[in-house]
Structure formats: structure tokens, C-alpha cells
Image (cartoon, helix red, strand yellow):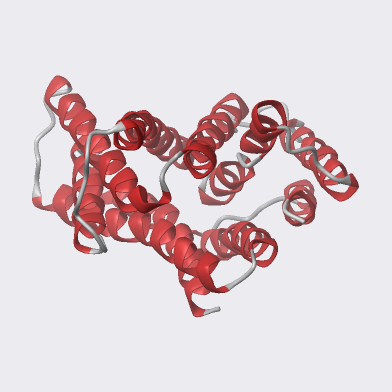
Amino acid sequence: MIYLFCAIASSAAVSAVLRIGDRKCTGKYSRFAMNYLSAAVFAFLTMQSRKFVLDGSGMFALGLGAVQGILYLLSLVSLQSSIRKNGVILSGTFARLGLIIPMIFAIVAFGELPGVLQTIGFLIACAAIWMMQVKEEKNSDKNYSGLILLLVISGLTDSMAKIFEELGDRKLDSWFLLITFIVAFFLSVGMMIYHKEKLGVSEIVYGCLVGIPNYGSVFFLLKALTSLPAVLVYPTYSAGTILAISLIGVAAFGERPRKRQWAALGMILVALVLLNL
């Protein structure tokens, strides 16, 4: 159970550190580059086996890891932009709600039909999204199109892991993650050069601080799945992350969700549990 709690804490810490770093750093992509570099180092250091062969399974891990690396950068850019515009709570919630996408993908691609409870959870999630999009004030400055984009990108990123789980060689899990972080690192460096960003001390420090929980959220989740049933791990991880992000947003950043948003958050927590039963 300790691994599951560590996974929840790591996932919530990514959003929190991004929020803090946004105030301290000027270079967005330089910070992302350091994030993925530190995550890649952790992935390499925690490898059980460093043997890699470019056979069919190796090429699949290489190609899918590269695709996930691209999505990782897009997801982090979307999360960073959304946090600045919409705050930690809404951004973190929609990022976690992205599991709707791999659910749809699993139905279409792998024929995994949802049960009654999962269907109810999907409908509740859609209703919660609608509630969050309804503006309580005419001059509301929330960027809901950005939140929906964040949901989609996060969901596509989660779908890559599902594809690898179904079709990949599980002995290459560590290589799959390492390739993901390396590709995201080089893309971030390219964007950093293109935007003529400088790599300062703040970017290095806060980038590495993001990279540690970023890798930790994946590492500890995999550890939790080896000792606990998935029906317990996934709903607890998703709901626990949203709850932790909400508490951080209220306690550390002074965010005050409105009654409609609190109700929607409650509905999303219920939906996430039902979707994973």
C-alpha cells in the first residue's frame, strides 16, 4: 500500500512543482528538458536489465516509446499552460479524467466492453465536464477549450501504455520508459534552442524537481500493481491524485473552487471509481 500512496503523492507533486516553478523560472522548455533528463537518469538507474536487442519487440518498444515521448512533452506543455490559466485543481482534474480516452480505445481496439458500472461512470464524467464548462459568470476567464485539450492529450498518453501492455514485451518496460524520456528530452532541447531560451540555475533546479515525481508516479504505480489488485490500485490512484491536487490548490495556492466546481469534482471522483471497477 505504501507504493500506491507514493504514486499518488508523486502525481500530485508534478502539478504543484509546475505551479511553483512557473513563478520562479522564465524558460519553459529548458525546465522541461531538465525534467525529462532527470527522469531518464532515474529510469536508467532503476533498470533491472540493460540488455536491448533491435528485434521485433525491441523495435516496437523503441517506436512506441518515441511516440509516447512526443505525447509526454505535449501533455506537460498543455498542463503547464492550463495551470497558468485555470489553476491547479481544474488542470489536475482534467488531466486525470483523460482516462476516458484509453477506455474508449480499449473498447474499439481490444474489444474490452465496459460493464454497467463503468458505463454509468462514463456518463457521470461527461455530466461533470459539462458542469465545469458552464460559466457561472459572463466574464469568467477559465479556458475550457484548453482543459478539454489537456484531457485528450493526457488520455492519448495513457493509451500508449495500454498498447504496450497488450502488444509489447513486458521485459522491456524499463527501456520503453527510458526511450520515452529521452525522446521528450531531445524535443524539449530543440524547442529550447528554437525559442532561444537560456538554461539557468532555476530551470535546472525546478526541472529536476519535476522530473523526480514525474518518474516516481510511473515507478511507484508499477510497484503498486505488483503487490495489489488493479481494481484497487487504479481507482484509488486516480481519485487520490485529484483529492491531493485539490487539497494542495486550496492549502498552498489559495484556490477557492465554487460550489458548482466542488459538485463537479465530487462527481468526477465517483466517475473515476466506477470507470475502474
Q: Relative to the observer, which residue lies in front, 139 or 119? A: 119
Quarter occupied by residue 112:
top right
Query: Residue shown at 65%/65% (left/top)?
Result: 236
Q: Position of residue 233 (x, y in %)?
A: 62, 64
Instruction: In the rendered view, tell whether residue 255 sits above or below residue 65.
Output: below
- Residue lying farthest to the top in this orientation: 194
Is 2 positioned to the left or the right of 109 in the image?
A: left
Instruction: Locate the C terminus and report the quarter of the image it occupies.
Output: bottom right
Q: Position of residue 175 (x, y in %)?
A: 28, 47
Q: Position of residue 124 (x, y in %)?
A: 83, 43
Q: Relative to the observer, which residue lies in front, 41 or 24? A: 41
Query: Residue shown at 44%/40% (left/top)?
Result: 168
Query: Residue shown at 12%/25% (left/top)?
Result: 193
Q: Position of residue 58 (x, y in %)?
A: 30, 37
Instruction: In the rendered view, tell whether residue 30 sits above or below residue 235.
Output: above
Instruction: In the rendered view, tell whether residue 208 sits above or below residue 113.
Output: below
Q: Relative to the observer, which residue lies in front, 185 or 84? A: 185
Q: Is residue 252 visible?
A: no
- Residue lying farthest to the bottom in this orientation: 2
Count the marks.
0
